Each structure stands twice: as structure tokens, then as C-alpha cells.
Amino acid sequence: MNLKISIVIPTYNNDFMINRILKSLSTTTLPKSVTEIIVVENGPRLNVENTCKNFQQQLPLKYIYTEQGSLSNARNLGIKNSTNGIIIFFDNDMLFEKNTLSEYDKVIQQYGDQCFYGGPVLADYEEKPPEWLRDFLPWSASGHSLGDEIISIDKALFLGGNHAFSRKLLEEFDGYDDMCATGEEGMMGEERRLQEKALRAGYQGIYVPGAVAHHWILKDRCSQDWTIHRKYRAGLTIAVTIKNSLPAKPCLLFGIPCYIVKDYYVSLFNYNLSIFLLNSKQQVFSKKFKLAYLKGIIAGFKSL
């Protein structure tokens, strides 16, 4: 095949990371199929446009700005302004190995536009979190790999920071939904939901082991407070799915499913009990972790 590839990089309220990722891309092997790299700055306008100009001799860059701070909107603007049949999406805090793009290209040319793609995301910590805390971190902050072989997947397993869709697929599903993050707030998982739609429609997911991205994780992005807030946002996100799957006449208390309210108060009791009993830090945190998830679900129902 001879599929052309675009890269879209959304960036929100950060110009340091854009300099870092573009510098990394400039040192990779850039396949001829990659004809454009689109940086979409959303939210506060910083120095991103000038940073892009600094790399225009090394990279086929386009810069777009939108005042609306929204990850999905930024990605969808990137799609709208791209010209190629395959679009790779990277978060702005990634670094790459020399062959990351060429490995993507090799597999994409082999499998074509009836598939979507993703590669490993490896954690690159500013400061390593405690080992016990890593069990509670999301894949994006603990690292995620499906091994060393090209494989087909039947679940939504690719992370938002390193994945690719065909234009045909993106147009079929109108891009990314608007239940998305703005910075560190709001709901999450729009790329997972799009993968699930694609799988149900018969598209195939292909894991590209050589398309490695290293995720730079600041120490405050894997702290205990951040991890709790992230779990809260996971609850906020899943509330939509729970609401859509409720029976016709559910048991509700103040608009919240009764079983969620029950689980919340049981978890609250267990959390306070663990503090009273002077349980270990990890035991107390695990109770707080679950409680944060239920708080997010309740907040999600209140906002729907």
C-alpha cells in the first residue's frame, strides 16, 4: 500500500512540552509517507506557534489555534485540517525512539485503513513514585505494553497518547466525542470509546510493538493526590455508561442509583475505620481510592 500519514498533536496551556516533543520527532526516522505534523494549541495562547516555526526546516509542520480548551475538539480540528488517510495522535508529553514512526509506517502499509493502531507507552518519571502506589496508577502513568510481537486486539487497549485511526474510520464515527478532558479536569476515555465503536463495526486493532512512545511524567502527575483525582475522574466518566445501562424503572435516591449510594456509604465507613484502626498507608489509600471513584460516579449523575 501507499497510505499517506498525518500526525496530530494537541497541546493545552504548555509550550515547553511542544518544544520537547518536536525536538524528539526531528531526531526520528521520518518516513516519506508522513507528510504533515499538525500541532493544535487549545485554550490559553502561549508561545507554541513560534516554537513550531523553529522546527519548520526539520519537520512538515502546521499550526492551528482554537480558544476552546478541549482535547476532543483539538483532535477533531486536527482531523479536519489534515489531508491524509491515516492519522497518528500523540500527546504533547511524549518522546520517541529513532524508529517509532518508521515502525508505525511499516505496519500501517501492511494492514491498511480497515484497522486502527497503537504502540507501547513507557513511563519516564521525573521522580519515581513509591512502588506500592504504582499499583493504583492508570496505564498512562505506570506504563503500558502488549509485548514484542505485532498482534490483533479485540478490546480497546490503546492509550490516547499513542494511537492511530484511518480517516475513513474517523469520518464514519464523526471523530472523538465531546465527553472529554480539558487539562486535568472533566471526563476521560474518548479514544477508548472510539476504539470500542470501531471494534463493534468490524475494524481491527493492530498493536505495533516498535512504535514506542516514552511518556514524561512529572512528579505531581503520579502523586497520591493526583492518583485520587484521576480515579474520581474515572468515576465521573463511567457515570454515563452506568446511566445508559439502567433498567426502565431503576431504584434511585436523589437521582443516584441506590446501589451506588449504598456502596458509597459502605466505602466511607471502611475508609474512616481504616484510619481509626491505624491501618498501613497502602490500606488506607486503597479505601480512599475506591471512595474517590464512587464520588466521581455520584458527581457524574448529578451533572447529567
Image (cartoon, grey):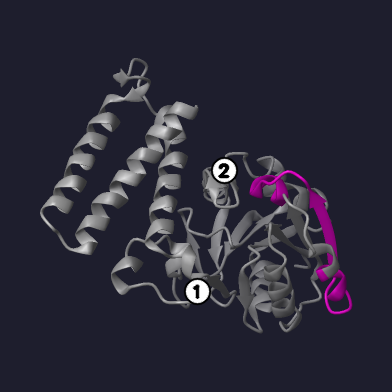
**Which residue position holds label 1?**
122
Q: Amino acid at mark 2?
A: Ala
Q: Secondary structure at mark 2?
A: loop
Quadrant position of residue 118: bottom right
Q: Residues within 10 Å of mark 2 (few under 14, many from 20)?
A: few
Q: Which residues are magenta?
A: 51-75
Q: Position of residue 246 (x, y in %)?
A: 37, 25
Residue 85 in the image: above or below residue 211: above
Residue 134: x, y in percent? 35, 68
> Residue 251 occupies which quadrant of the picture?
top left
* Residue 178 relative to residue 261: left or right: right
**Relative to residue 149, is residue 60 drawn left or right?**
right
- Residue at position x 42%, y 28% from top? 243
Q: Real-space Cα distance between discs 2 and 1? A: 30 Å
Camera-nearest residue between 278 and 157 = 278
Q: Residue, x 55% and y 52% (percent of image)?
A: 184
**First of labels 2, 1 by sequence position:** 1
Mark 1 element type:
strand
Q: Position of residue 8 (x, y in %)?
A: 73, 60
Q: Which mark is residue 201?
A: 2
